[in-house]
Amino acid sequence: MSFDLEQALNFAEHKHCRKIQQRTENSRKKRRVYYESSLINNVSSHVSDELSNVVSTLTLNMNTNPESTDKIVHDCLSKVLFEKDAQDEDNIINLEEIQSNTMNCSQVCKNSFDNLELSNDSSTIDEVLLHCYTDMSREEFCSTLLNILRDAHISKSHANRLLSFIRSTFPIPNAVPTRIEQLLEFLEIDNYLLKKYMLCTICNNILSCSDICCLKCLCSDHKCLAVVYDMNVEQLIKKIYIRLKMDIDEYREHLQTMHDRDETNDIGITIDHNHRIDVKFLSITGDSPALRNILNFIGHGGYFCCNFCYIRGQHIKRKRQYFYEKEQVLRYSSTYDKESAEAEKTKEIIYGHKGTSILQNILDTKLPEAIIIDYQHASLLRHAKTTRRTIYKQLNPSHRRLIDIKLKNQCFPHFFNRRMIPFKNLSFIKAVELRNILLYGFLPLSYEFMNREQLAHFTLFICSIRVYHSQPPMFGRETATIANRLFEQYNKDHKKFYHLIQNYVLHLHSHYGNQYVNYGSLANIECFSQEDLLGHISSNTHGTRYYDDQIVHYYNIDFSLNNRVPQTKYKIYYKPIDLDTNFIIDNYSIIIQYHNRICKCLNTSKYISIYRRCIIRNNTFHSLLYKRRTKSKSYFISYYKSTNNNEKYFGFIHLFFYCKDTTYAVIERFQNMHKFSSLFKSSSYFDLLKKPLDSCFSIVSKEPSDIFDIVEIGHVIKHCIVFDIEQCLIITEVSAYHEHD
Ligand SMILES: [Zn+2]
Ligand SMILES: [Zn+2]
Ligand SMILES: [Zn+2]
């Protein structure tokens, strides 16, 4: 026994020594290579070699045959994962070694990236001056001009006209490029991103773009010839990674320290640069037809169509209904795999599975946890829309008109780019507009007109989504539990108020709680940015032809321009902006009084400066002094009076003033009145609704109270949306900020 142990220890020690030897040898080699290469002044080539090594472990081969692509990705990933495991086992021998190893790795990496940044810099410095009467470089001129051209959406031909005009006004000789192609060349933006070629879809033969028929199978039908824009994914990931390195590093730090205060795990894809870039596939999302296809699952409306549980569904009047079930039987990942494999083998549908999913071997998380329900489709575009259409039909016509007018005229903070759309136009509505109605507008604007018990029931749903959506989490660690409880009750009683709309999307909401625990707030899960990208692409075309080439051309330029911007570390800003020099402070005795309490300086008008706007936690707030706010309302806010007072107050900001390194907001307060939940006192849902409802909505006096509060800007909480009701105002805070970007 003791002999065995001794032997094992010896072995481990021996191994340890060998490893250290190996490592010093390696780093010596590395240093030597670096030294030699820098001697012959060839840093950049050495570094790029090293980087291509870094990336080459993940070979994303753009193969035309989908099966083989899958296989390659799968092989690589499993290899990557396996290697990691093996390495870990090795390292168990000595804890010290693990630590020194990781330190060593990060050291090497840091070095290589420092070099990389260095080499990047040196390659982009363009010493040529624009002309001899300026110290502006050609490079600076070109990149500024290109940015302007892109922002102004100027087409290629007009850009060329502009260039030749600028050139003609400059002294000769000058270095202004003659054509846009030359400008791109100066900036070293070449068409590396996408390569264009033609493909015969019948025999997979690659043709050149000028060919009109396939030389191999002699097919000449233009519908069989596909134009392909092929992308070097490896290059792309490399560039994106270098650009976002700072953010990624910060996220990794969070991951390593597991600094996840609210336990929501909402940290995305990990890209790790220790020796290679590992791309982890966290999850899959989409609307339900897309998910059905990629997951090889039965479509919504079928029996057992829920990916998360074994709800069967009932067939009633040619519609499939999924009624509330007290005890859900959830699908576990082991049975999920087993059943999909069985379906694949037997070619039969097994509890909704039609076979294995092509994602099964790609995802690094297990199915079905890897599936994210897209709340914009499920909650906004489907369930909320259906329910509201039903409610709208129940209202009498004069009330419908009144609500529509109120919806149309409602003001929002300036960063809400869309107002609410009247109910009658519901078929053209966008997800963002539906979100604004559901989260903010519906309840305050319709409570006068609706049956109180039915509204209380729908309020369960509104509050549930508000709580799931809130950022920061409205009730800390209890957030998901509270939101889920609200939805359970809503789902249970749904049949009391609505007939035959208890469909699959309604059922899906019962899995939001689990999803919240895995992925965090609903505001994180969105396709709005993709919608923006599509809109951006469609606005990038000029004329009526060659859209494909134009889109690719501009995408390429934008990508390169983006990569040229030096990255700055993400910081949280507090800063007054928009100085008002004409403001006469002597008219505001309240400011002078307050100032004299906190500060000794005598000449107030000299030391206090007045501002019209202010950036607080990276969001811009307006004051009443700011006159260019048009119809937006970004001066109505919620705030705390001091650090040790937890009560929330509401009011509008008259102005910001700055003195002695501190910015203050001068706020006129609106008196808090009865709780919003008191409107539902007679409802059977009152107890359940009280806490979340009063956290979302408040009632204040219609007119300001003439009480002024002066608070440090750190005490300002959020922008508020104000609804003007007969004898009072209903106030609600903005739920989450980053979704509006
Ligand atoms: Zn062919
Ligand atoms: Zn389910
Ligand atoms: Zn002062």
Image: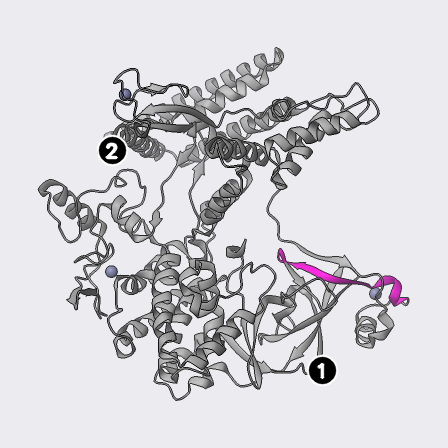
Label 1 belongs to which residue? 706
> Tag 1's secondary structure?
loop
Mark number displayed over residue 717: none
Q: Is residue 206 left or right of residue 118?
A: left
The answer to whether mark 1 is within 8 Å of ligand 3 is no
The extreme left residue here reads: 346
The verdict on residue 534 being magenta is no
The residue lying at 38 percent from left, 28 percent from top is: 227
The answer to whether mark 2 is within 8 Å of ligand 2 is no
627 above or below 676?
A: above
Gap in angstroms between the C-alphas marked 1 and 2: 85 Å
The verdict on residue 609 being magenta is yes
The residue lying at 65 percent from left, 28 percent from top is: 160
Q: Position of residue 245 (x, y in %)?
A: 53, 37
Q: Which of 660/510 is in front? A: 510
Q: Residues within 10 Å of mark 2 (few under 14, many from 20)?
A: few
Q: Position of residue 506 (x, y in %)?
A: 29, 65
Q: Which of 272/44 is in front? A: 44
Label 2 belongs to which residue? 2
Tell me if residue 517 can be seen. Answer: no
Residue type at tag 2: Ser
395 above or below 421?
A: below
114 above or below 510?
A: above
The extreme bottom residue here reads: 682
Magenta highlight range: 603-619
How many tags in the picture? 2
